[in-house]
Amino acid sequence: MIFESHAHYDDEKFNEDRELLLASMKEKGVEYIINVGASLRSTKETIALTERYPFIYGAVGVHPSHTGELNEERFAWLEEQCRQPGIVAVGEIGLDYYWDEPEREIQKKWFRRQLLLAEKEKLPVIIHSRDAAQDTFHIMQDMKCENIGGVIHCFSYAKEMAEKFLDMGFYLGIGGVVTFQNAKTVKEVVNYAPLDRILLETDSPYLAPVPFRGKRNSSLNLPLIAEEIAKIKKTDYDKVIEETNKNARKLFHID
């Protein structure tokens, strides 16, 4: 059975068929899903999904692009949500320098605060890092993230950065990008990384794999990602499914 380590089923793109789609997951081979918060609103909706669907677990957190909405009162609320049943991680948090706002110092402040929150609550982190490899790594190093643990979601950096994050004990989240013809860097990372440090993810509704690139993504596309990983690593598809499931269970403490 497949473990989906990163999806956003609270997204409005699922409003028309969310219930039907999620109801089909088990029969299509998807055992567990981590629905990941990206803002205060989506964190609330993530918690609601974990309450409705026993196979959905949640991550609560504020994506770097939304850190401008945080203040002490809202952060205190976020801290409380970490203790909700079914919440297994803090995320997605991190740095995103692709956009100019919010300013980088705001992103860094709340990245650090959410890392401290994860450490306090004894939860792993789901880290978003875009065009910010060095700052992400240096903050993680400074905050001793090897004691927190987690995954670098939608890993997109070169093998040299992968090595640093792996040495810190982190997992690498691999999604639909690995199927893109021009994704040479990601394919090299998948070839390099041990299978016991890889998680399957879709980032649904975004980043659909080939041949659905540009369309709405869902966890039902995970076999396409697993097949590509198996091809790159010259191993069996079933082994990729089994190992990545085991990895996710271990990281998120799901028996």
Image: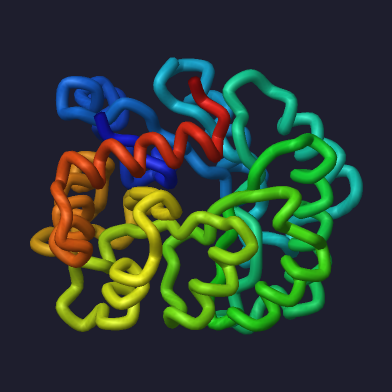
Pick whichever, 72 or 137, lies toward us: 137
Residue 74 seen in the figure = no
Q: Residue at x 82, y 69 (%)?
A: 142
Q: Residue 191, image x and y in percent?
A: 29, 70
Q: Residue 10, image x and y in percent?
A: 45, 38
Number of dots carrying numbers: 0
Q: Residue 81, image x and y in percent?
A: 72, 31
Return the residue found at the far left.
Answer: 211
Q: Quadrant of residue 41?
A: top right
| 151 vs 186: above or below | above
Q: Residue 126, image x and y in percent?
A: 58, 52
In screen coordinates, is 50 left or right of 29?
right
The N terminus - image quarter: top left
Pick whichever, 225 or 220, lies toward us: 225
Q: Residue at x 17, y 60 (%)?
A: 228
Residue 96 seen in the figure = yes
| 117 vs 183: above or below | above
Q: Residue at x 58, y 23 (%)?
A: 86
In screen coordinates, is 150 left or right of 17?
right
| 230 vs 243: above or below | below
| 215 vs 125: above or below | below
Q: Residue at x 60, y 50 (%)?
A: 150
